[in-house]
Image (tube, rainbow, N blue to C red):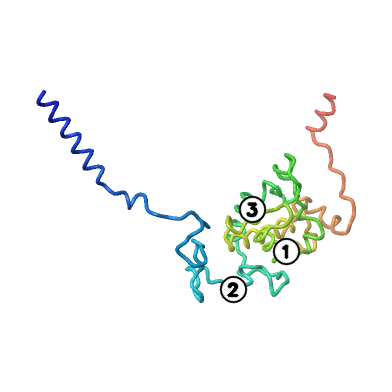
Amino acid sequence: MLSFRRLTAFVLMALLWLGGCRLDMQVQPRLNPLAKSDFYPDQRSARSPVEGTVARGDLREDTYFYSGKIGNNPGDYMPFPVNQDVMLRGRERFNIYCAPCHSRLGDGNGTIAQRGFRRPPSFHIERLRKAPLGYFFDVMTNGFGAMPDYASQISARDRWSIVAYIRALQLSQNASSAEIPAGQKMPSAMPEQRSGLDSGATPPARAPSSKDKNTEQRK
């Protein structure tokens, strides 16, 4: 009985001790975003930045880098040199964020479009092949039509890297033989056929192989 009384007294003392604890550090007074506040004269809990100050990392002195525009018109140059690293980064970001709708070829036949969502235009139509680089950056930054903006998901530099890769996709599908650098081969033609293709001649028919003959015999 004595031990039970001691245990009961210990429990009561513990409850009294815990009841005196304050949770101000864990449960602090706060306001939900954009909630009304009676503390400030304008009754807004969210405060505007101090006039004349700029948030750390938000000093956007290079207007073209962050907007893709020169004045009100889209520019047509990259704000930094394009190298292999930029192209690889652009391809990676494109395949993650753009390919689901635009497809990896940029023809607008991505998996999202195949499942009934509004199909985006192909990057290979004449209008977009002639569009300046800043146009694509602006669309990614601010959205266009059914496409939402991606400014919060993709950094400005990565958006420019995607722009460079989009232009590479366009060239891959629309380049002429005259645009191929000296010493490079046309991937769709054998060396001996290139002269004929460049002149507009029809390429010679390929001689049937033994595999083709065996297939024909089985038919």
| Residue beneath the point at 75% across and 49% down | 108
Q: Nearer the viewer, residue 89 or 46?
A: 46
Q: Label 1 is placed on what type of residue?
A: Pro
Residue 210, placed above or below residue 164: above
At horizontal 49% and vertical 61% (from top left) the residue drawn is 45
- Calculate the distance from the C-alpha at mark 1 to the C-alpha at mark 3: 26 Å
Residue 195 location, quadrant: bottom right
Q: Amino acid at mark 2?
A: Asp
Q: Which residue is mark 2?
A: 62
The disc, 1 or 3, on the residue closer to the chain's N-terminal end is 3
Left or right: 38, with 121 as reference point: left
**Is disc 3 placed on a helix, strand or loop?**
helix
Foreground pick, 132 / 196: 132
Foreground tag (3 vs 2): 2
Badge 3: few (under 14), some or many (20 or more) residues near its Cα, within 10 Å?
Answer: many
Q: Are marks 3 and 2 in contact (CB under 8 Å)?
A: no
Question: Could you tell me which secondary element the residue under label 1 belongs to?
Answer: loop
Q: Position of residue 187 (x, y in %)?
A: 74, 52
Q: Which residue is mark 1?
A: 181
Instruction: Point out the tag, 3 or 2, that comes first from the N-terminus.
Output: 2
Q: Identify the mark at residue 193; answer none if there is no mark.
A: none
Question: Label 3, on which residue?
Answer: 94
How far across and how far down the image is residue 212, in percent?
Answer: 81, 33
Secondary-structure class at tag 2 = loop
Answer above or below: position of 175 versus 74. above
Q: Are marks 1 and 2 in contact (CB under 8 Å)?
A: no
